[in-house]
Amino acid sequence: METLKVGFIGSGFIARFLATAFQHVRGIELVGVLKRSTSEDISAFARQIGVGECKVYSTIKELCQNCDTVAILSPNYARLETVQEIVDIVKSGVELKGLICEKPLGRTVAEATKLVELAEEIQLPTAYMENQIHMKVVKNAIIQTARVQELMGPLTMVRSSEEHAGPHNPWFWDPTKQGGGALSDLACHSIAVSWFMLTPTGKPLDYLKPVSVNAETALLKWGSGIYRDQLREKMGIDYAKTPAEDFATGMVTFKNPETGFLSKAQFTNSWMYDKQGLRILMEALGPGYAFEINSLKSPLEVFIADSAADALADAETALEKATSSRGLIPVQPNEADLFGYTDEFVEVRDAFLAGRDALLNWRYGLEITKLCQAAYMSAERRCTIDLTDVNIQKELESYTSLIAQGRGAEVLY
Ligand SMILES: NC(=O)c1ccc[n+]([C@@H]2O[C@H](COP(=O)([O-])OP(=O)(O)OC[C@H]3O[C@@H](n4cnc5c(N)ncnc54)[C@H](O)[C@@H]3O)[C@@H](O)[C@H]2O)c1
């Protein structure tokens, strides 16, 4: 079996998670990582779990010369310069099979568009990493309801949310670096997976046309009192001056181009979810059928009493972004698989080895960026954004939300 040799740019949180997923994918190897403060850790971890030699390379050029796929897992603000450098390296004669980029593709539509153009310049297959579409529970729900969908009609409404108590590194909290707050960080997942689930079986990903977006952003937890102080002390970010939203909710309306029927994707995303840990919750409703996915439901529950809490392991071994290490704790034994990281790499491996784009390419990532930015526009202007309006489409091309400009106080206070 041919092997896809992957090199990581970025050796932080998601890099480690994805390396874990490699344990369950055949024909894929983590051959290298770009040198950064945490790269030795990921390199040692990769060798320890047997997913590749993962040598540390000092430059992007050396990394590209020693792998055939580059996965961009660095912070959102570093995307453009990284991809520009890779494009120059490929133009100088280094061969690659493909480029992977984590979500969100861009902090603005302009940035995402530029990334698409750069990849197209060197005609390299791309993969946009939206893991939720690859979740086994999502795929199984669709398989299980395929026949009923055929007889009764497709889903008409999907509610989707991803929420947790707040990100782990300062740059996520800085709206100018990250591109916003919880909406930019998490609604890209919820909007994408809802669009995917609403799409009638067998139709292309962009079959349903997004016609409007309505959204609200708010700062419900991290903008005041002890939480604002905590943020300043731990992350060095002052939400009195440059806040981002820690809560966002809204609705994207899609139109079926053949029947004219409308369907709705309702999203809720937050960094103020003080429960056991990160929760992905999806509820899909169709005519006469429904399904629900809740990532906090696990067949394994552990109970730790107060009297035993001192002896406890790191809470995050139970769940991503776990906030508690005692009481009744749901434990997900294989989050990399649950969240779809395993299956997304199986799909990327097959696509890149065959010389084609992954199911979700960067053009798809651009469409998701457009929907997220339209949501910011809606929240800012307090109105529904008509995505069929050519003037709005034009405006979105150069739009940067007030929150991403560092002017969130004008919207959130
Ligand atoms: N799909 C998911 O569920 C998911 C989950 C978490 C993060 N992500 C995405 O992955 C990306 C990284 O997030 P993370 O949580 O791993 O962040 P992180 O802060 O934990 O790690 C970032 C890594 O990038 C490195 N880095 C910083 N600046 C760089 C630069 N200029 N060039 C190259 N490397 C640089 C850092 O040293 C670090 O190793 C983000 O875009 C985030 O949105 C996706």
Image (tube, grey):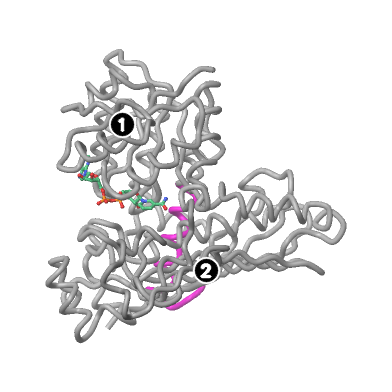
**Which one is in front in this view, the residue at disc 2 or the one at disc 1?**
1
| Picture quadrant of residue 118 | top left
Q: Tell me what residue is drawn at x 27 percent, y 47 percent.
A: 12
Residue extending farthest bottom: 225
The magenta span reads 366-385
Q: From the viewer's perspective, tell me whether residue 172 is left or right of residue 342.
A: left
Mark 1: secondary structure? helix
* Looking at the image, residue 32 lies above or below residue 262: above
- Identify the main secondary structure in magenta: helix
Residue 47, label in figure: 1
Q: Nearer the viewer, residue 133 or 112?
A: 133
Q: Nearer the viewer, residue 101 or 209?
A: 101
Residue 267, label in figure: 2
| Picture quadrant of residue 54 | top left
Residue 232 rendering spot, x and y as whole percentages: 14, 72
Q: Residues within 10 Å of mark 2 (few under 14, many from 20)?
A: many
Q: Amino acid at mark 2?
A: Phe
Q: Tell me what residue is drawn at x 75 percent, y 66 percent.
A: 286
Q: Tell me what residue is drawn at x 48 percent, y 51 percent.
A: 334
Quadrant for the N terminus, please. top right
Q: Tell me what residue is drawn at x 48 percent, y 71 percent.
A: 268
Residue 353, label in figure: none
| Picture quadrant of residue 313 | bottom left
Mark 2: secondary structure? strand
Q: From the viewer's perspective, tell me whether residue 62 is left or right of residue 194.
A: left
Residue extending farthest top: 93
Residue 357 rendering spot, x and y as whole percentages: 52, 31
